[in-house]
Image (cartoon, rainbow, N blue to C red):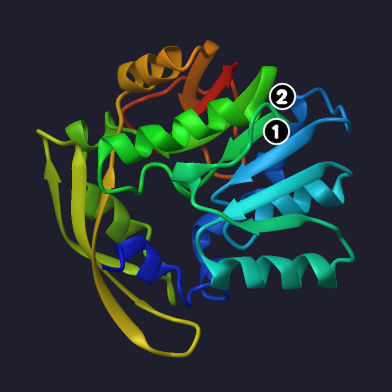
């Protein structure tokens, strides 16, 4: 049975690149570069790379990047964009729950809910973190964003998404947040790249900071920092608050 995230990204590459949340790529890569000290020898793994916006920008800056994603449609778009820019990026079709890499990368990134936390069980989400940990060399760094579980305790996810709605973007309705599972269930309506209107029943897992810290510690990460994730302007100076829809996580293996 096809999962909602597989159906969503099957023919949603060009439209995805038009979503408002894809606008912060350059600033987010500025933060990534700062975190690795601008060392061009850094080999980077982009998990859930989608249409390759971060992978391509980092390759443009001279980094060796491997991007993995479950969606062939997204990867085709990524390869086309890289080729048009005259860049060499290694894009691979790969399930983030079963990453094949062992101690190959200096940095792993996983941004904008590219894989984690879309999975239908906590065990599957954990498998993604475990794979990222295994892919890193000793001393490697992991930078990712995920949904902030503190937000729905104080705010309405439904109202937030409605306020963020932009013309042509996907729409979200009938949101219900489950306090026992910390999952938001909703109906997502969007128009795919072929002009077909689709409606999917989706759910995503929100995580509180203490959960993320424990999960990462169980995988032998250290120096774990959790911050507010501001689109296009990631910063260690932004203390995580209940107003932040996403959290930014930085950890060392």
Horizontal side of residue 249 vs 55, given as left or right? left
Identify the image quadrant of residue 222. top right
Horizontal side of residue 166 vs 87, given as left or right? left
Q: Secondary structure at mark 1?
A: helix
User: Residue at horizontal 11%, vertical 35%?
Assistant: 179
- 56 to 117, vertically: above or below: below
- 100 to 154, vertically: above or below: below
Report the disc number at residue 32.
1
Q: Nearer the viewer, residue 134 or 155?
A: 134
- Work out how far the residue at label 2 is from the one at label 1, CA to CA, in angstroms: 5 Å
- 148 to 117, vertically: above or below: above
Q: Nearer the viewer, residue 178 or 44?
A: 44
| 10 Å crowding of disc 2: few (<14), some (14-19), many (20+) | some
Q: Is residue 156 visible?
A: no
The picture places residue 69, in percent across and down from the top left corner, at 55, 56
Pointer 2 and pointer 1: residues touching (CB < 8 Å)?
yes
The picture places residue 223, in percent across and down from the top left corner, at 56, 9
The picture places residue 31, in percent across and down from the top left corner, at 69, 32
Image quadrant in which the N terminus is located: bottom left
Q: Secondary structure at mark 2?
A: helix
| 10 Å crowding of disc 1: few (<14), some (14-19), many (20+) | many
The picture places residue 75, in percent across and down from the top left corner, at 62, 66
Identify the image quadrant of residue 213. top left
Q: Nearer the viewer, residue 22 or 131?
A: 131
Identify the image quadrant of residue 188. bottom left
User: Residue at horizontal 37%, vertical 64%?
Assistant: 165
Q: Which residue is mark 2?
A: 35
């Amino acid at each position: 049975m096809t999962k909602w995230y597989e159906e969503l990204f099957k023919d949603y590459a060009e439209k995805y690149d038009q979503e408002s949340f894809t606008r912060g790529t350059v600033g987010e890569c500025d933060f990534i570069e700062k975190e690795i000290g601008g060392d061009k020898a850094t080999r980077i793994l982009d998990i859930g790379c989608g249409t390759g916006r971060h992978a391509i920008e980092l390759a443009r800056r001279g980094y060796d990047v491997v991007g993995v994603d479950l969606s062939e449609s997204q990867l085709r778009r990524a390869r086309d964009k890289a080729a048009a820019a005259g860049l060499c990026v290694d894009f691979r079709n790969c399930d983030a729950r079963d990453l094949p890499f062992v101690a190959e990368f200096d940095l792993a990134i996983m941004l904008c809910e590219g894989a984690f936390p879309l999975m239908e069980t906590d065990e599957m989400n954990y498998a993604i973190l475990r794979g990222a940990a295994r892919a890193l060399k000793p001393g490697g760094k992991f930078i990712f964003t995920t949904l902030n579980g503190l937000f729905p305790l104080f705010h309405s996810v439904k109202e937030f998404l409605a306020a963020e709605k932009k013309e042509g973007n996907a729409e979200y309705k009938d949101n219900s947040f489950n306090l026992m599972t910390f999952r938001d269930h909703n109906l997502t309506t969007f128009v795919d790249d072929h002009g077909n209107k689709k409606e999917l029943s989706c759910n995503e897992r929100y995580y509180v900071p203490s959960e993320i810290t424990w999960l990462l510690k169980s995988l032998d990460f250290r120096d774990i920092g959790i911050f507010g994730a501001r689109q296009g302007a990631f910063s260690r100076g932004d203390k995580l608050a209940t107003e932040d829809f996403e959290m930014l996580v930085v950890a060392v293996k």
